Amino acid sequence: MNLPKIHSITKKILVALVGGFLLVFLLFHMTANLFVLRHDDGAWYSAFCHFMGTNWIVKIFEIILLGVFALHILLTLWLQLTNRLARPVRYHEAQKSKTHTSSKLMMWTGILIFAFLVMHFCQFYFIKIGWVKGEYMVETEKLQSDEIMGLVQYSSQMGMTPEEFIDAMESESAMYADENGDSEEVEEYLAGMRDKLGVINIVKRASDEGNISADGKWIRHLTYDERQTLKKVLPESKPEPDFYFMVRELFHNPLMVLLYLITFVVLFLHMRHAFPSAFQTLGLNNYKYNNIIEWCGRIYAWVVCLGFVVVPILVYLGL
């Protein structure tokens, strides 16, 4: 097998730089996750997700982040493969080594983390980009169009529900068509009103089931079909994934909680070695403060992983 000729130390430096970037991102992601624990009906977390999903700078950053994830995985596999190809014949006897256990497991913990990322993306990110169905939410004020408000007002004045009002108008339209033989414009208008009725029913269901946020800004727990209705009738409404609801639903499942906890243990082992290893690869270590770097790595890994761990545990406990 012919692989591109890049010096091993160059590949290690690239892995260290990319890994360092991901270490910082994990701290940011962990901090944002803690918003789920606030007892504000998801106001902070939803506002954060809304910002992350609508800001164009963040969207560019997401593409960069995905590229960095892919680059880190490919570089690590490439480095591992070239190292093995450099010594095709293994030692006859196992050599004793003082290398830390987490270092020896880096390849395997990386593979497990990659498998978790695929699942995690299916549960959240792929819903955001529309590859997977989920739960959705929409800003209340974006559903208050003049046509919809007018339909509600006119039907109320006639002592009817909006659906009864449209049925009555359709009956009159049919009579008009029988007498004049032409009602295309009226039928087109009524078809549009029937679509608007779908939006009214969405709002009514949300109100009846208590799916309007405490601050009244969001209608939550929309289904995929309701999202499609809004995108068709009111494309400017731009319904978004309801990540707060999905997170809390996910962590009511004990198997999912256990799986996430195991993943964070694996992540801890991976980070435990990655932090000091990055300093060593970049030539930033020194015998005078190697122990400080080692302890900073441990503390960083503990803080990040414990920050991730408390969310599924406390949500499962109903806190």
Image (cartoon, helix red, strand yellow):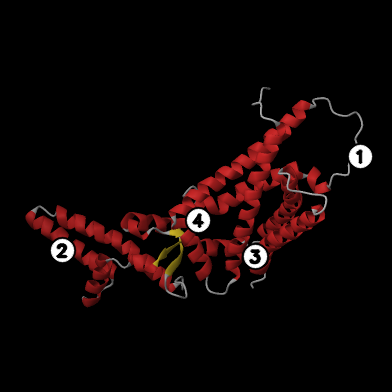
Q: Pick whichever, 175 or 277, lies toward us.
A: 277
Q: CA distance from mark 3 to mark 4?
A: 20 Å
Tell me the number on the disc at residue 172.
Answer: 2
Task: Check disc 1 and report the residue beneath it.
Answer: 96
Earlier along the polypeptide chain: callout 1 or callout 2? 1
Q: Residues within 10 Å of mark 1 (few under 14, many from 20)?
A: few
Task: Check disc 4 and report the residue beneath it.
Answer: 134
Q: Are marks 4 and 2 in contact (CB under 8 Å)?
A: no
Q: CA distance from mark 4 to mark 2?
A: 40 Å
Secondary structure found at label 2: helix
Earlier along the polypeptide chain: callout 2 or callout 3? 2
Where is residue 25? Give x, y as percent: 61, 54
| Residue at image point 71% right, 33% down | 8
Q: Residues within 10 Å of mark 3 (few under 14, many from 20)?
A: many
Whether residue 146 is situated above or below residue 119 in the rendered picture? below
Task: Check disc 3 and report the residue beneath it.
Answer: 311
- Which residue type does callout 1 highlight? Lys
| Residue at image point 73% right, 44% down | 283
Where is residue 225? Give x, y as percent: 41, 56
